[in-house]
Image (tube, coloured by chain):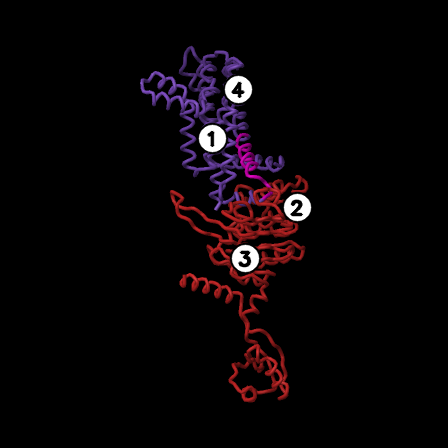
Chain colours: A red, B purple
Amino acid sequence: MSESTPIEIRGLSKVYRTGFTQARKVQALSGLDLTLQPGTVYGLLGPNGAGKSTTIKITMGLVQASAGTALIFGRPPSDPRSREKLGFVPENPAPYEYLTGREFMEMSAALVGLSPAEGRARSSELLEQLDLQRAERLLIRKYSKGMVQRVALAQALLGRPRLLILDEPTSGLDPVGRSQIRDLIAAERARGTTILFCTHIISDVEAVCDRVGVLVRGQLVREGTVSELVSSQTSVLEISIEGVGLERLTEAMGKPLQARVAADGRLLVQVEVADRERFLGIVLQRGGRVLSLQGARFSLEDLFHQALSEDASRREAA
Amino acid sequence: MSARAVGALVTNGFREARRNRVTVVLVAFAVAMLSSSILVTQVTVRTLDRVVVDFGLGVMALILSFLAIFLSTGLVSREIERKTIFLTLGKPLGRTSFLLGRLGGNLLTLLVLEAAMVALYLAQLALLRTPFTQPQAMALIGLFFEVSLLTTVGILCSATLSQTVAAVTTTGVFFLGHLSGDLYRLVRTSDDAVLRFAGKAAYYVLPNLERVNFRLMAAHNQPVPLSTVLSGVGATVAYSVALFIIASWIFERRDFK
């Protein structure tokens, strides 16, 4: 329960009651444990309905947990002080559309506790940083989706937060808009800001996150760094060589090898991790050269699908 | 509770109302109605003062009550529906402070609108050489507290119901609030004990808006005792505070899905 830990979640559960009589129960989260270490970018991945937004809403104090605790810098979400060092961008952010970009920023600055002068200065700085200064006098209702997303991000940065919580920040954006948001996340990470990044866009997670958690049906089914998660699933290496033919290698290995020839003539051979040393020895003994060696591509997307199919199998078995 | 944050919400609420088309249309309508009272005086012979006062105060009460209901019942429910509340509550701001800021914004809007209408009304009195009297001043003060109470009812409904249901409920409270005294007097003479109890219960539970309605006295130029004004205002403020506490208690426990 340290004040320096940005987010500490223990045994968090949420049951929504729906229907006219509130009799129907929907389990959105079950016993979630999650800790964010300072300075990390944590990607919370999961399909729609996995509980990502519920986790964020409980953390932000927008929804009350049915069981368990969530602490932000050691404080419960019900304490407004827990949000003093926090910036938040919800999914599909909706700033007041009857305000101009600048009015919205200055109002948000006052809510963060900045003085009017500080608020004006910080708003100018962020509007410029997010390329909104030309639209600052325009009503938000006239903004494009990308501009709304940027102004929402700008307001989250007003108080120079130590923790940023971003719920689907790149959803619905074009490639340029997504790239801008990714750059901004990278810049905040460089500043030492801890970021909880919630999305179902896997390439975004791969691009910006240090650690990843995969949430399926309210439970954390995988957690680790991107490379840990991917390499734990990699049992095959792709070795790029030249100067020796596939036939000689197959003969020396004594078993068939999967290989293809690259456009520049290199031979790309797939080798089991267990056979790595033996294969490399054979290549070198036969006068070949090893150009590169890497784990065969098992993407986060593959991992994500694997987690989903495992969950489906578990449910079928149950 | 940060005064700066609440102040920002009050200013924002006022700005929102000012940019709302319905407010603008209603203010224009009020101006037209107040101005047209000059025409009404053309058809009166000996009771010019009474007609001007009655018509002027009546139009103000009607427009401000409608605006209080319209603006307050959408305050919270619209924020939840449009999800604008997520960005605001994502700040270091308690929910009660949020509600207080929104209430303050609405009250400021109503105060400014009433001040503008009073200015027009006074100009009209001056034009028609009708004196501005103590009962009229008390009626105008009472009117502000009446619409303030309606606003708190609207906010309570808005924190728990959808905008349409909240508007219907608050409108119902507006009518019952003006009729509760009459209803109580009516059922008190009934032989049915259950009806008598229900009437008495409704009288004590519902707000009595007639306690701050001095418009009839103003029209007849009957002086309003200060004690009557103070007790009426005191009761209205106490009722408003009680409603706000209930609204805040409910709002603090709501989930925003």
- Residue extending furthest top? B46
Amino acid type, residue under disc 4 in the picture: Leu
The CA span between labels 4 and 3 is 63 Å
Viewer-nearest residue: B250 or A298: B250
Whether marks 4 and 2 lie on the same chain: no
Check disc 1 and report the residue beneath it. B153
Q: Secondary structure at mark 2?
A: helix
Graded by Cα atoms within 10 Å as few (under 14), some (14 to 19) or many (20 or more), the crowding at tag 2 reads many
Q: Quadrant of residue B201?
A: top left
Q: Is residue B102 magenta?
A: yes
Q: Residue A283, relative to residue B105: is it above or below?
A: below
Q: Secondary structure at mark 1?
A: helix
Q: Is residue A5 magenta?
A: no
Amino acid type, residue under disc 1 in the picture: Val
* Residue drawn at point x = 54 percent, y = 63 percent: A203
The CA span between labels 4 and 2 is 45 Å
Amino acid type, residue under disc 2 in the picture: Arg
Which residues make up the magenta segment?
Answer: B91-107
Whether marks 1 and 3 lie on the same chain: no
Check disc 3 and report the residue beneath it. A44
Check disc 2 and report the residue beneath it. A122
Amino acid type, residue under disc 3 in the picture: Leu
